[in-house]
Image (cartoon, coloured by chain):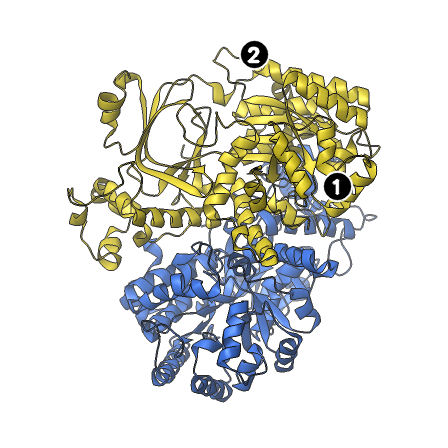
Chain colours: A yellow, B blue
Amino acid sequence: MARIIPSVTEALHPSNINSKALVKLVTTVYYGTIVHTPALNQLQVFPNCAVVVGSSGSIINLIPNCSSISDVFTKYNPELDQKSTKIVDISGNPYQFFFPGFVDTHIHAPQFPNAGIFGNSTLLDWLDTYTFPLEASFENLHKANKIYSRVVHQTLQNGTTTASYFATIHPEATKLLSNICFKNGQRALIGRVCMDDNSPDFYSESHEDMKTNTVDVCNHIKQLGATTDQECDAIILPTLTPRFAPSCTAKTLAWLGDFREEKKLHVQSHVSENIDEIKLVSSLFPDASCYTGVYEDYNLLGAKTVLAHGVHLTPLEISILHKNQSGISHCPISNSSLTSGETRVRQLLNSGIKVSLGTDMSGGFSPSILSSARQAHLVSRHLAMKTKKEEDKLSVNDVLYLATKGGAQCLDMESTIGDFGKGKKWECQLVDLKSTGSQIDIFDWQLPDYLIQRGGYHLKIAGRELLNSDDYFQDFHGVGLSKFDNNEEHKWINDDGTFIDADQSKFEDLIAKWLFNGDDRNTTKVYVNGRCVIDKTE
Amino acid sequence: MARIIPSVTEALHPSNINSKALVKLVTTVYYGTIVHTPALNQLQVFPNCAVVVGSSGSIINLIPNCSSISDVFTKYNPELDQKSTKIVDISGNPYQFFFPGFVDTHIHAPQFPNAGIFGNSTLLDWLDTYTFPLEASFENLHKANKIYSRVVHQTLQNGTTTASYFATIHPEATKLLSNICFKNGQRALIGRVCMDDNSPDFYSESHEDMKTNTVDVCNHIKQLGATTDQECDAIILPTLTPRFAPSCTAKTLAWLGDFREEKKLHVQSHVSENIDEIKLVSSLFPDASCYTGVYEDYNLLGAKTVLAHGVHLTPLEISILHKNQSGISHCPISNSSLTSGETRVRQLLNSGIKVSLGTDMSGGFSPSILSSARQAHLVSRHLAMKTKKEEDKLSVNDVLYLATKGGAQCLDMESTIGDFGKGKKWECQLVDLKSTGSQIDIFDWQLPDYLIQRGGYHLKIAGRELLNSDDYFQDFHGVGLSKFDNNEEHKWINDDGTFIDADQSKFEDLIAKWLFNGDDRNTTKVYVNGRCVIDKTE
């Protein structure tokens, strides 16, 4: 643990830190299997793809069905200098692919030590028993430094390339969280929590402090981007964070709404998580049309606003969210753990609402968006048990979409991250289904034929490391390696560079195995802004 | 993978194999933290305990609050020869403890390759699409050998010391599974699946074959116990396995009922998993009082009978189960995945029904009972959302009880396994909350004071490896190490050797962290029948 924690002095002063996601970069070609979810329920796989990433970290070209790396330089991008271009080639390994980084749109960084500790509580008693006492202790910067360093390390290890963090009310600790994200190269939205009403004496602030401290933290984050000579993409952004309607006075909500509009800022908060909470909001804001209506009344909804949960949204609330293009962070692990309810994700999607995933640590016990996606899949089935609607079930591809592109949409970052579109950032994870200790069991006959064929050369020279090739070709498949020699008559992949149907189906099964039995071990490298910020293979 | 798979020839002939759980054993003293769940919702922790395990693998003595290992020989068990006794001392590590091995009372070994692959299916179409074709292929013994070797390896790695396996209809492949369990030292009940009605042409058997093959496999398993000179505890037992009522003719059910009574055998099957399945049973057995009634009518219920699922049991069915002392294997991951429903576990427990946990691979996607316990906890909350009954929520301690002692009860093995009672087998896992790669994050101030005190000596000499002692003592706890010097006035543990309340509460939080964020990495050693059959520290 010690090694990943900087000294507080170091962590507090941006002039001393450099971001891993802003180091100097050379043009790089990534070659192998590329997988993403460009649309809901659509898993697009390019099994033999070259991606050219420029020195700014953005995708210059994506070349499906690229028969060799040299083609990139001779045929597709002749302007590139082969000598100064870096090559990352995973094409020999049928178990590896690049997948967009996960986007966690709702996570409480200070609650990390409480992961797994919630007993039989529900939202309101959980806040009093577990949450407020821990958050209040973040006045201690040594403690904040240790915990924040750990949470950023753990989320990155689990493939979270972008996170929208709730911090605490403390400005210095919140700046420290910004610095730690910046240093480790995690794209992050950082929110100092605003709470000047209905909060415990030991953990509350005045309206004036709320204003001063909010401005102070926003300025600090702005300054972070100015600390480097590198081309800066502002990987750390501020986000206004009224904890939830009950914990803010009307004048605080009003000031935040004005500040949002003036500075065009992101906003994050909670909505309609729990029945008792909804009743509380209704009693505190008797003039509001509904819980979501409170945020609209104070000008806090916009395309950059994400509200967590939305378990019990009414049709009116859904229409308000739609009108304002605001998104929902679905936090299924938290909703199950705190017995909050089953969010009707399909209904929200069908209503045109942007939906993403949040871990909601420590309401949710896991720092992993992969685990959250898994639980989203299961919770949708519990919802379907109740509604008897087959369509309420989310598919594997659906939840992976929510985990990546859905997150990008909710944070209004769709032009930057979420999939492998041209011009977007190379912001992804290298997934290895057979990494050391992987809990995913794949038998050779479950691999797409094309990946076997592509790996044929490697098979012949070092095959037993990757595949029990004898098993595959003799026991299960009943064909010899010669099947995979070049054969003009056999169509291996479609014209657009994607798998033929049989292989697509097999690959989707592998992706399902990753969703259900994969974990941090399968995420072997993590890239943010084109830079490798985690490399477990070193 | 290759290393864990024996040749088929080797695996087929019991005369060639020795069981890891029957190797010669010397008397051993285990010293450190011992944790188990002797009753529902009760987590009993002996933080400074010595357990004396005899050469048969059974617990001779459990000595709570044992101040030193030498006391075992001088004070408690003077008849022991210290020189020939082995010592396993984990008392210096506050993150390690022994916990009973997990009992998986429902797992389909041949379906292992399909883990995670189930799409949007529900029970009956899932059987046709995914399950029957894969199971039918187990006529191929090479394939059976590879898959069965893998599943036994994986379940043991995840702490499953006892498993009740469904195999396939194939007698040779089923014998092979028995041999693989025997060789690897996993306690197992092995069931050749009986199905002579309403089954696909490519995967069915005649009534006559059912009889012959059932007897054949039972005899083989009996013979397994006779292959060794060691004292044999019959770690492999046969279990009669009518797949489920619809797949058996009346005469097959009747013959199995008679055979059960004659041989006093275990029985396993399925019951009331899915609404369509229940309707099917009702149409096929119009004279039966209910689904459970079918099994009672054919004399298949007894104290050694475990029925999987029981999601939709009626009060009549619950009373039939109670009368016959038969148990339920609750399979929460499967029930969520296949949208089967939410089993009312608390109602079953309150009705005096024995309840345990099953992974139900591959209806469930995980080979881990720890994952199943986690999902049991979450599913009980989805049930509570529906029933609005607070008591329907299962606690952390509840689900760990189901995972261990509940399993022992369902399999009628409570006198042998399930907790650390005197006379029971030493059948457990060494859990290390800070093993390499552990996903459990514990901050020093979350440790029970007593464990810090006990580890004080180690702290002083090698403390930084185990604890950031400075952090603990300065940053968080506000006390110096001197607090932990012997102090007559401070009571460290209760008279019965358990934690004082404050430490018990802290330790239960650590156990919750293990349940929610732990995985195979935290199970570092596994013991069956007193013998270490998995050692990841080697």
Q: Is residue A243 visible from the viewing direction of this image?
A: no
Quadrant of the image occupied by residue A247: top right
Q: Residue at x 71, y 70 (%)?
A: B350
- Residue B275, position as x, y percentages in the image: 55, 68
Q: Residue at x 35, y 43 (%)?
A: A95
- Residue B50, position as x, y percentages in the image: 64, 60
B219 over B538 or under it: above or below: below
Q: Is residue B153 left or right of residue A91?
A: right
List the residue tagged with mark 2: A226
Amino acid type, residue under disc 2 in the picture = Ala
Helix or strand or loop: what does disc 1 sit on? helix
Helix or strand or loop: what does disc 2 sit on? loop
**Front residue of B387 and B77:** B387
Q: How many marks?
A: 2
Q: Is residue B411 visible from the viewing direction of this image?
A: yes
Amino acid type, residue under disc 1 in the picture = Leu
Q: Is residue B372 left or right of residue A55?
A: right
Chain letter of mark 1 equals A
A407 over B114 or under it: above or below: above
Q: Which numbered disc covers residue A127?
A: 1
- Residue B194, position as x, y percentages in the image: 41, 77
Q: Which numbered disc covers residue A463?
A: none
Q: Residues within 10 Å of mark 2 (few under 14, many from 20)?
A: some
Q: CA distance from mark 1 to mark 2?
A: 37 Å
- Residue B238, position as x, y percentages in the image: 45, 77
Q: Residue at x 75, y 21 (%)?
A: A255
**Front residue of A463 and B23:** A463
Sequence-first tag of 1 and 2? 1
Q: Residues within 10 Å of mark 1 (few under 14, many from 20)?
A: some
